Amino acid sequence: MENNSYIDALALMGVGGAHPGGLQLTKNILSRENIDEEMSVLDAGCGTGQTAAYIAEQFQCHVTALDNSNIMLDKARRRFSDGDLPVKIRQGNIENLPFPDDSFETALSESVIAFTDIRQSISELNRILKPDGVLYAVEMVMEKKLPEYDMKPIIDFYGVTRLLSESEWRDLFQEVGFQQIISNSFKQQVENVDLNDGPDFSLSENMSDETMDILLEHDRLTKLYEDRLGFRIFRCSV
Ligand SMILES: C[S@@+](CC[C@H](N)C(=O)[O-])C[C@H]1O[C@@H](n2cnc3c(N)ncnc32)[C@H](O)[C@@H]1O
C-alpha cells in the first residue's frame, strides 16, 4: 500500500481513467500525434492501465506502463492479459525512472506528477525522452489563487506538497530542459461522451466504507473548488 489514502482508495476501487477528462481526453490528446508502430511510449503512473491499453490497441506501438503501486499494476496486468496486449509493465518510481536516457518518443503522465516531487519527476521524464520526444502531462492547476485556509485541506487530502499555478508549472518544465511548452484546458463534451470512454473499475476484495468515503470527498472537493482548482494538459517538447 502507498501512504497516500486518496491514491490507495483509487487503487482499491481499481479506477481506470483516474484523471480529469478520462479516456476521452486521452484520445483527444493522442489524435494530434503521429505515433507509428516503431515508436516507444511510456505511460508513467499508469494506474490500472486504461490509457496504456488504448495506446497499444490504437497505435500498435511499443508501450511501457509504469506505476509504483502493486495493486494498480496487478489490475493493469489483468487488463493487458485479457486484451492480449503486449504492454511491458514496470514497477518503479517516476522520480527515479528505471530507464536509460533517450528511451521514449512519447511519455504521458495523467494526474501523477502533482503527487510526487514535481521537479524531480519532470526532470526524469525529460531525461528518458529522446531529443525530439514529447511529454504530455495532465495535471491539477490552481487557476485562481486560493487562500491558505482553502489550500490546506486540499493539500492534506491529496497528499501533495503544494498546488501550482499554470505559470509555476511552466517554469518548472522549462527549468528541467523542456523548451516548448503548450498548455491547454479541456471541457468535457458531455453530449459527445462515448460510454466506452468513461472510467472503469476493478474492485479489490478488501474495500471498506472508508474507501468510498475518500472518493466521495474527492468529488465534493472537485465541485467545491471547480472555479479555482482546474487542470491543464501540458505538451512539453525537448
Ligand atoms: C490519480 S492516479 C492516475 C492513474 C492513471 N494515470 C489514470 O489516469 O488512470 C495516480 C497514479 O500515480 C501513481 N503514482 C503516484 N506516485 C507515483 C510515483 N512516485 N511513481 C510512480 N507512480 C506513482 C499511483 O499509484 C496512481 O496509479
Image (cartoon, rainbow, N blue to C red):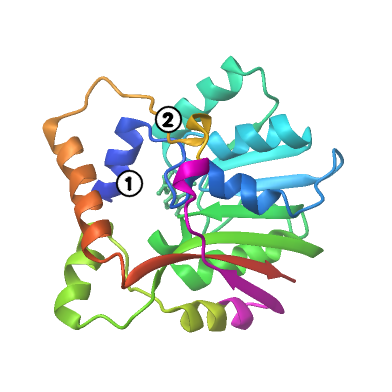
Q: Residue at x 34, y 80 (%)?
A: 144
Indicate the position of residue 12 as horizontal and vertical percent values. 30, 32
- Residue for point 60% across, 83% down: 175
**Eye-nearest disc, 1 or 2:** 2
Q: Is residue 128 visible?
A: yes
Secondary structure found at label 1: helix
Q: Where does the C terminus fall, quadrant-wise?
A: bottom right
Q: Which residue is mark 1?
A: 7
Name the residue: 67% across, 67% down: 126
Where in the figure is residue 198, as x and y percent of width and height? 45, 35
Mark 1 residue's CB less than 8 Å from ligand 1: yes
Q: CA distance from mark 1 to mark 2?
A: 16 Å
* Residue 69 screen position, x and y as percent: 42, 40
Q: Secondary structure at mark 2?
A: loop
Q: Quadrant of residue 13?
A: top left
In the image, residue 6 lies at what x, y percent? 27, 48
Q: Is residue 170 left or right of residue 166?
A: right
List the residue tagged with mark 2. Answer: 200
Residue pictured at 19% horizontal, 53% vertical:
220
Whether residue 113 is in magenta: the answer is no
Disc 2: residue Cβ within 8 A of ligand 1's nearest atom: no
| Tag 1: amino acid | Ile
Which residues make up the magenta segment?
A: 173-192
Pointer 2 local density, CA inside 10 Å: few below 14, some 14–19, many at least 20: some
In the figure, 190 relative to 58: above or below? below
Query: Is residue 69 shown left or right of residue 219?
Result: right
Q: Earlier in the sequence, mark 1 or mark 2?
A: 1
Dot 1 and dot 2 residues touching (CB under 8 Å)? no
162 is higher (above) or lower (below) than 9? below
